[in-house]
Image: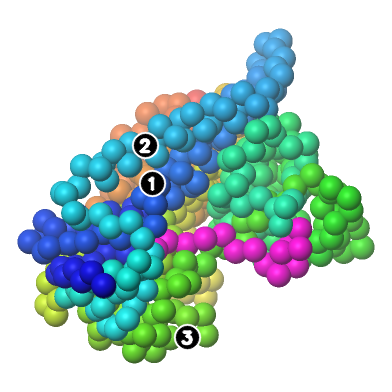
Amino acid sequence: MTTRSCDVAVIGAGTAGLAAERAARHAGASTLLIDPDFAGTTCATVGCMPSKLLIAAAHANHGIARAGEFGIEASGRVDGPAVMTRLRKWRDTFAQGVRDNIARLPEGVCITGRARFAGPSVLELEDGTRIEAGAVVVATGSAAAIPGPFKALEDLVLTNRSVFELEDLPESVGVIGAGPVGVELAQALARLGVRVSLYDSGDSIAKLPEETTEALKPLLEQDFPVHLGTTPEPSREGDMVVLSHDGTSERFDRVLLAAGRPPSLEGLDLAATGLELDDHGMPEVNAETLQCGDLPIFMAGDANAIAPLLHEASDEGAAAGRNAAAHPDLKARETQVPLAITFTDPSAATIGTIPDPEDQSLVTGRADYADQGRAKVEARAGGLVRIHAKASDGTLMGADLCLPEGEHLAHLLAWTIASGKTASEVLDLPFYHPTLEEGLQAALREICRKTAAPRPWSRDEGPTPGF
């Protein structure tokens, strides 16, 4: 049996794991990075980038489809194999870039294999290698859940790991799950000519609050039906999937499961660490230090299920790596304004603090983009933004939205919230005419009217010039 030792061992070479190893090494620790295949990050291989490649193709086709609104005659034909070939070409390029970066790590850092705990800071690999570490970072990511009723249909089931491997676009797909992944892929497939229906047992879309979900739902339904509050029963009919709900049935070539991504902890044998585990095999993770219990074990990225987003995984990985190197001298990580974006059209986002309806400490200003000038010009009118601020002085605290170019406005709002500005101060910033940003003014003015310290004057009270 081979025994290796290090200050910090990191399990998983995804976004969080790579950030953890780098941070620990930069802190002066000796490191080992363990992964079964070093294939690349979830983002590059089966997540952010391939999904955006599919969305980009859908956007191009949708532009052709609505060209008539501008008096332009255009027609297009979707070449499914060509769409998927381009997707995989660029997906593989992005993934190779990650693998190239891994290859540049110091010699001896990377160990190929699957690790399991044999003690609080002792790991064993399948080949018998024993790793004795000062601290361990678990960054094993997550995997798509396949609910029991769908297991018998597995050859007809798609997940984010398999959908991008299709040689051609199917004629029809039933999508289970109206979270960000489900709704993004549902719209992209629909705009590429696939017959799509979306189902979710809950009552929200993309984790948006009720009012914003209600604004987004009819806009999405211009492309495909959205069934909320329903759990379809799956069955097989030849080579088709039948989804039955509320007395009706629909048949699809495939079903895409996007109903959750639980942490990938199978095979780690976390029980061998002595950590107290819940019914799902999860330890308690300190959200500020990423430490599990009081042991020299840290958990970062999708593995801890705190915030399964790439930028959060990177930040968490770096914090976990630093704390693992410094253990037991831990520091709380610096958190950013929460920001989650769903790349639908219109795009949706939540930023910062989203208040409970009963919370009296915050006020909300709204702007309706169904009547926004620039959005009308571009034939993209529709959607809503809600901005939340302290009732005491109008300091911006959060926002949720679904509107054209929402991904960009979400960043502006996140940066504004991080700067600590009030609605009054933001209204005094430049707003160029005519832009989509201009539409935020109505929400900011409403906040000023509702706060204890309203604006005494404004150069832009009343309608935006030109509308």
- Please tell me whether residue 156 is drawn above or below residue 325 in the rendered image: above
Quadrant in which residue 234 is drawn: bottom right
Q: How far from the left and from the top, in percent, is residue 54?
A: 57, 35
- Amino acid type of the residue that numbered disc 1 sits on in the rendered structure: Gly
Q: Is residue 150 magenta?
A: yes
Left or right side of 174 for 370? left
Left or right side of 395 for 282? right
Q: Nearer the viewer, mark 3 or mark 2?
A: 2
Residue at the limit of the structure toward the left, as seen here: 28
Which stretch appears magenta?
Answer: 140-153
Q: Please report whichever mark, 2 or 1, sits nearer to the chain's N-terminal start.
A: 1
Quadrant into which the N terminus falls: bottom left
Residue bearing the label numbered 2: 96
Q: What is the total number of numbered labels drawn onto the structure image?
A: 3
In three-dimensional space, the C-alpha distance between marks 3 and 2, rounded to whole angstroms, equals 37 Å
Q: Mark number for residue 278?
A: 3
* Marks 3 and 2 close (CB-CB < 8 Å): no
Query: How would you rate the neighbour count of disc 1 (Cα within 10 Å): few for under 14, some for 14-19, many for 20 or more?
Result: many
Residue bearing the label numbered 1: 40
* Marks 2 and 1 close (CB-CB < 8 Å): yes
In three-dimensional space, the C-alpha distance between marks 2 and 1, rounded to whole angstroms, equals 7 Å
Query: How would you rate the neighbour count of disc 2 (Cα within 10 Å): few for under 14, some for 14-19, many for 20 or more?
Result: some
- Amino acid type of the residue that numbered disc 2 sits on in the rendered structure: Gln
In three-dimensional space, the C-alpha distance between marks 1 and 3, rounded to whole angstroms, equals 30 Å
